Amino acid sequence: MQRTVFYKLFAMMFLEFFIWGAWLPLIFGYLPSLGFSSWQQSLILNAFPVAAILAMFFGNQFADRNFAAEKFLAVSHLIGGASILALAWVHDFWTFFALMLVHCVLYVPTISITNSIAFAAMKDAQREFGIVRMGGTIGWIAAAWPPIFLLVDWKKVSDSNAKSVVDWLGAVFGSGLTGIEMQNATAYTYLVAGGASIVLAVFSLTLPHTPAKPATDSNEGLAWLESMKLLAHPFVLVLWIVTLIDSFVHNCFFNWTGRFLPTVGVPGNWVTPVMSIGQIAEILTMAVLGTFLKRFGWRWTMVIGILGHAARFAVFAYCGDESFKWLIVTVNLLHGVCYAFFFATVYIFVDEHFPKDARTSAQGLFNLMILGIGALVANFACPPMFNALTEVVTATTVKGSKDGNAVQTLTMNIPPAEGSFELPFGKNTTGRIPNNASAAQVQTTLESVDGIGAGNVQVSGGSLPKDTLTIEFTGALAKRDIDQIGSGRVHFRELFQIPCFAALVAAIALALFFHPPKIGSSVVATAPTAH
């Protein structure tokens, strides 16, 4: 592959995954801050997997049969970029959902398209794809780490009166934004994602030309149907089902980890970087992927990737307290093994064994599981599982009044557990409190709750759980019937055992039942004849 072509493909992958990495990690906390209900959040989150399913029958069909790949990439990123760019200013559900759906429907097919453009330009996919795909990993990292400095409460940093650079950095790293300030700052991630998408739209026109593959009588003009017929091969079907399980496990990580890390002492502005450090390990893993494939083969390379998920969730489940914070942070490095040794290997396997005239749709067949059905199952199953394993701890409350019932006072003494405030008035009145929250942190959290706002509550005292805090609601809020306030204690051990066990089942199934042809052979030679 020519050096110039390599640089273009690398930059293409960088921008492709920078877009996704800019908005995905923070959206799980951003949507509740907009006051969206649980079902509204599920609909928005599932726009991406639904788009992956539609891509199987729409976007990839266009790319295979009707559209030059690089032009499809340009049009998709132009329109999709404008859609997600607009989300920075949108706060009502239906507009937000519609724009996110447009972006996802146009973005998801481009993941397969970028793979196809790269594979078409390569001479040795096993050796070259891992290095090119590394550009996507670096793009995700580039999008994930700036929040350390962007999502900072600079007033708190200024008030710290740091005397040295080290002290100043310590104040920055430990002063993450909360409440309405966090919401406003998070909105900028959509500007960044949209801008990158528009840049990629223009850049796509410089990529190697990858022409459409017109339909023939033998393939009936339906690339997706041709690829679906290949599921008649037992080893392809086994891999497809295992991919569903591994995708579910992978998406459990995104659904739950952001809420788990604060319970072991990870500051809010460090949650996204900690979740993304696996991408750093992924750079090294992708670089050696070709060597592992040649030494261990398809099956055992993918088994190792799945077991990486099991090991990570086992650490989360059985070492889930602050004394093991270093291990919980470090184990995320296994993400590189999880992604490269399974998902990237699946993409390479598809390129080796699927028919050349339907290769994009064959990639889409597995993206249907990786980005579609697996994520869809996780996004519907994870919230109720989280709620089922959350124990609500209610604080002791005492009512009082001052100045003609203008102030209502409650006392609060909650066991150490990260969770949600529960107030019996308003809409979506939930907030997050960390372990050892101070009175100031509790006040900031309450002020961010929909229906309270700044200036309507005053919290005094020491810090939870050792001290009893006094909460005073003033003005109109003092006249409401506020008789309890509580914190949700999540049973993370039982929660993380679910994806850990699922990963073990998937690894065993793959080891026992996945028997692919030798490297270099093709499914084409043994594919069932179409009639």
Image (cartoon, grey):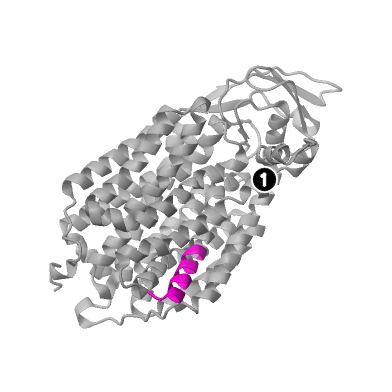
Q: Residue at x 58, y 50 (%)?
A: 145
| Residue to which mark 1 is pinned | 182
Observer-nearest of 451 and 23:
23
Give the side of residue 183 with respect to residue 335, left or right: right
Observer-nearest of 219 and 338:
338
Q: Position of residue 316 (x, y in %)?
A: 43, 33
**Could you tell me which quadrant the N terminus lies in?**
bottom left
**Could you tell me which quadrant the C terminus lies in?**
bottom left
Q: Position of residue 451 (x, y in %)?
A: 70, 39
Q: In this picture, is 301 found above or below 14?
A: above
Instruction: Tell me, yes or no, if residue 490 can be seen here.
Output: yes
Q: Residue at x 35, y 60 (%)?
A: 367
Give the side of residue 226 with respect to residue 252, left or right: left
Residue range in magenta is: 1-15
Q: Residue at x 53, y 70 (%)?
A: 200
Instruction: Tell me, yes or no, if residue 428 can be seen here.
Output: no
Q: Residue at x 39, y 36 (%)?
A: 313
Q: Position of residue 290 (x, y in %)?
A: 31, 58
Secondary structure category for the residue under label 1: helix
Q: In this picture, is 55 found above or below 240?
A: below
Extreme-right residue of the structure = 403
